[in-house]
Image (cartoon, helix red, strand yellow):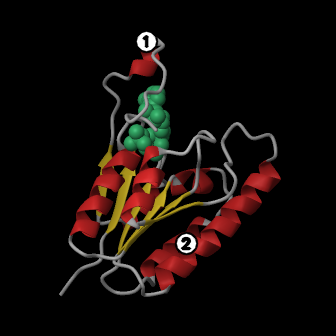
Amino acid sequence: MRKGLVIVNTGNGKGKTTAALGVLLRAWGNGMRVVMLQFIKHTTARWGEIKAAEKMGIEMIPLGSGFTWKSKDLEKDKALARQGWEICKEKIQSGQYDLVILDELTYTLKYGWLPLDEVLQVLKNRPEGLHIIITGRDAPQELIDFADLVTEMRKVKHPYDQGIRAQLGIEY
Ligand code: ATP
Ligand code: MG
């Protein structure tokens, strides 16, 4: 009998989203039904993983037209987060998936755009056997307490600190 896990990749170090992508690849390779929903787009550039997913026929859904923490229009960000969450809920409750990834979900919680109680309720009532991965910095304690597997990425060094810009294939 499969036990659906709630997995959280958090912390300030690099690797939260890419670790989730690694699991996505692994699950997909095993014939599992996977989907990744992405709450935050850093650039308008098309990320490598989105291009890869297209080639492989994997569902990867950017939620909204690129809300970022730089946005001045917080009401719009909030509305986009809520719209995005509705799609996440649909996917989670559909029974059509074995693995659902909610990339950068933690920011929507941090900024209070989504109610944590509702998110936890949806996770709790998910179809049996469904694995969920949540990524992003500053995961709230309640989410950490609820999860089965939590990893904190810790920065030891990052090229940004030396003024080295984001590199194709490594960061996007
Ligand atoms: P990745 O998508 O590479 O796995 P991530 O999901 O852990 O990274 P995010 O917080 O989502 O990290 O931010 C993504 C971008 O920010 C990446 O380009 C990443 O290299 C960069 N980044 C991550 N950690 C740091 C850090 N400590 N200092 C500066 N930039 C960082
Ligand atoms: Mg990330």
> Residue 104 versus residue 21: which sits nearer the camera?
21
The amino acid sitting under disc 2 is Cys
Position of 141 with respect to 115 (left or right) is left
> Residue 82 versus residue 22: which sits nearer the camera?
22
Crowd class of label 1 (few under 14; some 14 to 19; many from 20; radius 10 Å): few
Q: Quadrant of residue 109?
A: bottom right
> Residue 50 versus residue 150: which sits nearer the camera?
50
Vertical arrangement, residue 132 with respect to residue 2, above or below = above
Which residue has dot 1 on it? Answer: 162
Q: Which mark is residue 39?
A: none
Residue, x 47% and y 53% (percent of image)? 50
Q: Seen from this angle, which residue lies furthest top?
A: 162
Position of 116 with respect to 57 (left or right) is right
Residue, x 67% and y 60% (percent of image)? 81
The amino acid sitting under disc 1 is Gln
Vertical arrangement, residue 48 with respect to residue 142, above or below = above
Q: Is mark 1 within 8 Å of ligand 1?
A: no
Q: Quadrant of residue 158?
A: top left
| Image quadrant containing the N terminus | bottom left
Residue, x 28% and y 60% (percent of image)? 25
Q: Position of residue 38 (x, y in %)?
A: 53, 57
Number of disc labels: 2
Q: Which mark is residue 88?
A: 2
